[in-house]
Image (cartoon, rainbow, N blue to C red):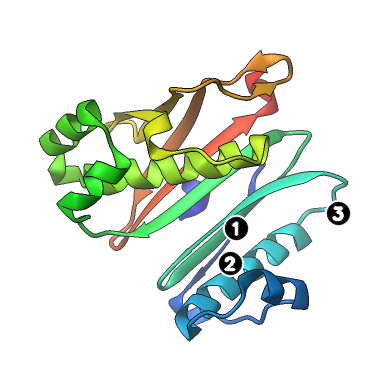
Amino acid sequence: MMNRIVPDHILVVECTEAGIVGKLRVEEEATLGRVVDRRYREFAAGRDCAHRALARLAVWPDGYVGSITHCEGYCAAAVARMEHVISIGIDAEPVARLPDSALDLIAFDEERRWIEAHRDVGQELLTFSAKESVFKAWFQLTGSWLGFEDVRVFFDIESETFVAHLLIAGPVVEGARVQDFHGRFAYTDRLLLTAVVLSINDY
C-alpha cells in the first residue's frame, strides 16, 4: 500500500492487524516508557517494520533515512540510503471524519474554506495526515518542532499529489533553502496514506 506513493528506491515494510507482533529492544522500551497494551503493540510493530526494512538492504548502509507510522491495525516503515534520499515522512490514518473542533488546530482560514468545499474526499483528514508527513521529513532535517500553522498544503485531488509550502524559513539542503515539500497520498478501504520524500535528485 505505502509503496504505491514512494519512489522505487525506498524500501517499505508494512504490517496489518493479523501480523502485528513484536517485542521492543531494551533501548526502545526505555524510549517508549509506560503505555497501554494497544499503544505498545503499535509502537513495537512499527519498530519491527523498520528493522525488517533495513535488513532487506543489499548492504547495510553507513547512512540511511527512514520514517515509521502506526495506527490501529496497521504499521509501516520506509527506509532509503542517504545517497538517494535526504528525508522521508510517512503517515497512515484510519479513514474517519475529524471533529470540527480539530480544524482550528490543523488548518487556518484559507485551508478551512477549501476543506469545507471538499468534505466528500475527507479533506480535513487529508490535511492533517499530509502535515504529519511533512513534520516527520522536516524533523529529520532540523531536529526542531514545526507547528500546523507553519505549513500551507495545496492538493491536486485528481493526481493524488500535494505540495506543502513552509510559511517560515525552511532548512538549507545542499546549499539551497527548502520551502516546499512534495508528497503523494492514497486511500484504501479503511486507511489514508501520505508520504513526503526529499530526494538528492531534487537538488
Q: Which residue is mark 3?
A: 60
107 relative to 100 in the view: left or right: right
- Residue closer to the observer: 125 or 135: 135
- Residue closer to the observer: 130 or 101: 101
177 relative to 190 in the view: left or right: right
Q: Looking at the picture, which amino acid does disc 1 mark? A: Ala
Q: Looking at the picture, which amino acid does disc 2 mark? A: Gly
**Crowding at label 3, few (<14), some or many (≥20) Cα neighbours within 10 Å?**
few
- Residue closer to the observer: 47 or 80: 47
Residue 174 pos. (x, y %): 73, 19
* Residues tagged 1 and 2 counted as in contact (Cβ below 8 A): yes
99 relative to 140 in the view: left or right: left
Alpha carbons under labels 3 and 2: distance apart = 20 Å
Residue 134 pos. (x, y %): 49, 38
Q: Looking at the picture, which amino acid does disc 3 mark? A: Trp
**Crowding at label 1, few (<14), some or many (≥20) Cα neighbours within 10 Å?**
many
Q: Which mark is residue 46?
A: 2
**Crowding at label 2, few (<14), some or many (≥20) Cα neighbours within 10 Å?**
many
